[in-house]
Amino acid sequence: MNVLVVAFFAFFGGMARYFLASELPSWGIFPLGTLLANFIGCFIFSFLVKQIMTKRQLNGRLILGMGTGFCGALTTFSSFALDTVQLLQKQAYGLAAGYLVLSICGGLFFVWLGEALVRKQV
């Protein structure tokens, strides 16, 4: 049953990722879709984890589906790495460095924000 829950939520995470990657306006060669997908995933996952740790009121299957399924399909380290390498290959060194810094700092910020919102609810 857990496999079906993960697969069900992964479908929606994958579709959200596809939408972000294909439908957002392009910023030239900057991988905006991957960046936003990873930010959204960091926020949702940290919010869920903090919610579990503080309130423990979420259903276990919902947590598994949202965390492993949805967030796992939405976020991707491999696309982040590939996008960075492609920027470097295009000699867009400033964009590559900015993408690295923005991805890491932004990801940390959205993890903090997800946890902070749960703390505020407690």
Image (cartoon, grey):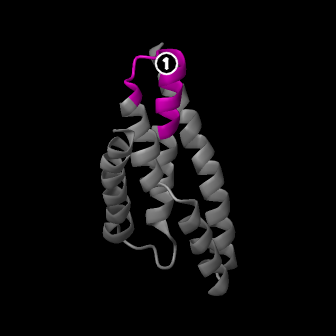
Magenta-drawn segment = 45-60
Q: How many marks?
A: 1
Which secondary structure lies at badge 1? helix
Across and down, in percent, residue 73 comes to 43, 55
Inspect the image, locate mark 1, and give the three-letter code of the amino acid beneath it: Lys
Task: Give the quadrant of the N terminus.
Answer: top left
Residue at mark 1? 120
Magenta stretch secondary structure, dominant: helix
- Report the side of 59 relative to 46 (left or right): left
- Residue 53 colored in magenta in the image: yes
Which residue is most to the bottom? 90
> Residue drawn at (64%, 81%), measured in percent from left and top?
92
Task: Decide: few, some or many residues near mark 1? Use Cα within 10 Å; few <14, some 14-19, many ≥20.
Answer: few
Q: Quadrant of residue 94?
A: bottom right
Across and down, in percent, residue 77 comes to 58, 60
Measured along the vertical axis of the image, is residue 12 above or below residue 62?
below
> Residue drawn at (54%, 41%), measured in percent from left and top?
110
Q: For this rendering, which residue is in front, 84 or 53? A: 53
- Report the side of 68 relative to 19 (left or right): right
Across and down, in percent, residue 44 comes to 45, 39
Which residue is most to the front? 1
Q: For this rendering, which residue is in front, 40 or 68? A: 68
- Residue 47 colored in magenta in the image: yes
Measured along the vertical axis of the image, is residue 37 above or below residue 118?
below
